[in-house]
Amino acid sequence: MKIYVDADGFPSAVKGLLIRAAIRLHVPLVFVANKKLKYESSVIISSIIVPEGPDIADDRIVELAQPGDLVITADIPLADRVVAKGAFALDYRGKLYTEDNIKDRLALRDLLYELRDGGVVTGGPSTFSKKDCHAFVNQLDSFLVRQLKNETAQK
């Protein structure tokens, strides 16, 4: 299992927590962004710099993601694409996307987009909070422990 991070717009509040979890559990972590990122040096942490442009980082993540991998992203269409490949997606607020729930979440996202476009709904998501950070860390830890147990049991 690897963790891929859609790092353009990734909240710095959870970056250190994610890095510590990856190091503690020995899970390779790959940041994908269109700019150089600063992070703690480790043999299991790396980054891929892609050219600027719409969906270039997303396309690279989809290309790399394998069944069982985890992709950290707030981008619902990207989450849908990686889940279709058998991977999982986790947003910055702690919502885990799987084959069981991604299509509903994508439909809701599309509906809200249309409502905002029509002026019915204004604004976007609330500001990232400590509650969101805790939800992310709890879901991340729970997911990683569960997946690593499954991998160990399959060996």
Image: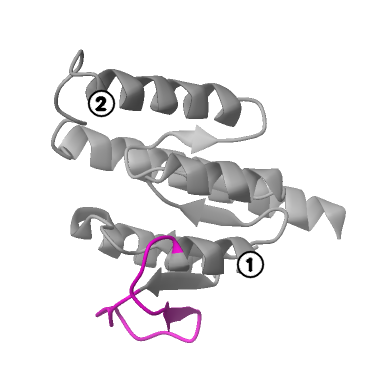
Q: How is the image coloured?
A: one colour
Q: Position of residue 111 (x, y in %)?
A: 40, 20
Tag 2, which secondary structure?
helix
Q: Residue at x 41, y 50 (%)?
A: 73
| Label 1 sits on residue | 63
Of residues 52 and 78, the one drawn nearer to the viewer in this rendering: 52
Is 44 situated above or below 87?
below
User: Label 1: how many residues lie within 10 Å, few (<14), some (14-19) or many (20+)?
Assistant: few
Q: Amino acid at mark 2?
A: Asp
Q: Which residues are magenta?
A: 34-55
Whether residue 46 is in magenta: the answer is yes
Of residues 118 and 145, the one drawn nearer to the viewer in this rendering: 118
> What is the quadrant of residue 50 in the picture?
bottom left
Residue 146 left/right relative to 30: right
| Label 2 sits on residue | 117
In this rendering, the label closer to the viewer, 1 or 2: 2
Q: Position of residue 105 (x, y in %)?
A: 49, 26
Q: Is residue 155 visible?
A: yes
Whether residue 121 is in magenta: the answer is no
Is 17 situated above or below 95?
below
